Amino acid sequence: MNADNGVLIHHVLGLVILILGLGMFSGRLAGALKLPDVALFLFAGMIVGKGLHLINEPSSTFVNQFILLTGSALILFDGGKNIALGGLKKVWLTLTLLSVPGVLLTCGVTAVAARFLLDLPWLYAVLLGAVIASTDPATLIPVFRQVKVRTKVRETVESESAFNDATGSILTFTVLAMVTGGGGFSLTGAVKEFAVTAFGGIAVGLAVGYVLLYLVAHSRLGLLRDYTTIAMMVTAISAYLAGDLLHVSGFMATFVAGLVWGNAGSFGLNVESKEREMAHFSDNVTVIMRMLIFILLGSQVNFTVILANMVPSLAVLLVFMLVARPLTVLACALPDRKAKWERNEILFMFWVRETGVIPAALSGMIAAQGVAHADVISSVTFLAVLLTILVQASTTGWLARRLGLALPDGR
């Protein structure tokens, strides 16, 4: 081992030990305070980063990019795996509208606010809107484990958060290609690029997910049954890599692969005997990835940029939370007569839309490419994560009880 490699290895090992150690203590404190753990991860990162200077990992480094990409892929895979297709028949139209047109609407309203309040050029305002348009399964799913609400509402919001993460990622990279390519905006070109990357990602995810699931779950040819959890991780990373190499959406591919694994019975395969083991493994992996991503994100916060743009950034986020989200829910839920949405259910969905892992990862990737205005996009994303988690996630239980949607007996 040469000296340079030795220094790098020691740096990475020390970084991982520090982050996971901080993450464990922050997670325990979050439990005691009844706050989402990612909020405490962010604060911990801020303290050891810009505060104590114990972490200095710029967004452009290989280590940072590796953590963001791998963590995002594994979290998206887990989001897909937690969706039961059978339970979505009544709300499929709402979910479809929230997952694609809803993301575009949220992005558009936020972009208009960013253009005039932050004075960003239009394309960069759209890029900001795309980054923060999706919600977060890594935050919402743990919240709903603590707060029991009506099954229809919970499954819709959780499923939306998983589907629209993939949509938001595709939209972000489509706009980013325009920004870095220096070309003008073409609606036809943008729609074509979106369709190719989305449907290509779906095809890759189905293929990779089914092949590896078959090797695990087939009654006679399940050669990898004893390695189910390892095969699950390989599936998530392989789907992302295959999608990226084929120039389609790796994020959509890994999400769809997770969807295949989570609904093995629909494909004539059976992993029931391994479900408990898989769930335990997934929970631990996603917690580790949340620690790594959010503590790193907190350590990279540029307080100078945040403070310089604090007032307009908060104004943009108020539009984002109080205008864009309600408009999106109304536009996507009201046309769905079959779902029979009640007024209080719609009001609840107005409020529940945490921003989290995927937007944080996307903003980090944009910063790593040296894109103009990346510092503003990163600072607004950080504030969006912080506000939606501290304000919205922490009040979800109270709102569910106030609107009569809570199930105190845990049904």
Image (tube, rainbow, N blue to C red):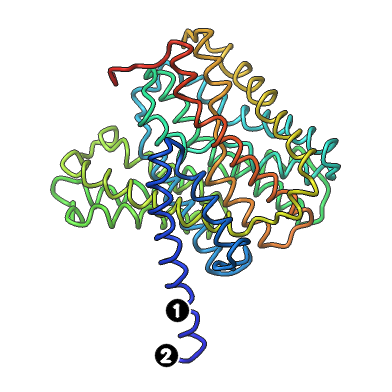
Q: Nearer the viewer, residue 26 or 7?
A: 26
Q: Quadrant of the N terminus?
A: bottom left
Tell me the crowding category of disc 1: few under 14, some 14 to 19, or many 20 or more residues within 10 angstroms, Cα based: few
Asked whether 383 or 175 is in front, the reply is: 383
Give amino acid for label 2: Met
* Residue at left offset 52%, top offset 87%: 4
* Nearer to me, 235 or 207: 235
Among the 4 quarters of the image, the one containing residue 264 = top left
Q: Is residue 218 above or below residue 148?
A: below
Residue 364 relative to residue 219: left or right? right
Residue at the spot 33% in from the left edge and 24% down from the top edge: 86
Labelled pair 2, 1 in contact (Cβ < 8 Å): yes
Q: Secondary structure at mark 1?
A: helix
Q: Is the C terminus in the top left, top right, bottom left or bottom right quadrant?
A: top left
Q: Position of residue 321 (x, y in %)?
A: 65, 28
Q: Is residue 158 above or below residue 165?
A: above
Secondary structure state at the residue bearing disc 2: loop
Disc 2 to disc 1, C-alpha distance? 10 Å
State the residue lying farthest toward the left: 220
Report x, y in % for residue 296: 54, 58
Q: Which residue is mark 2?
A: 1
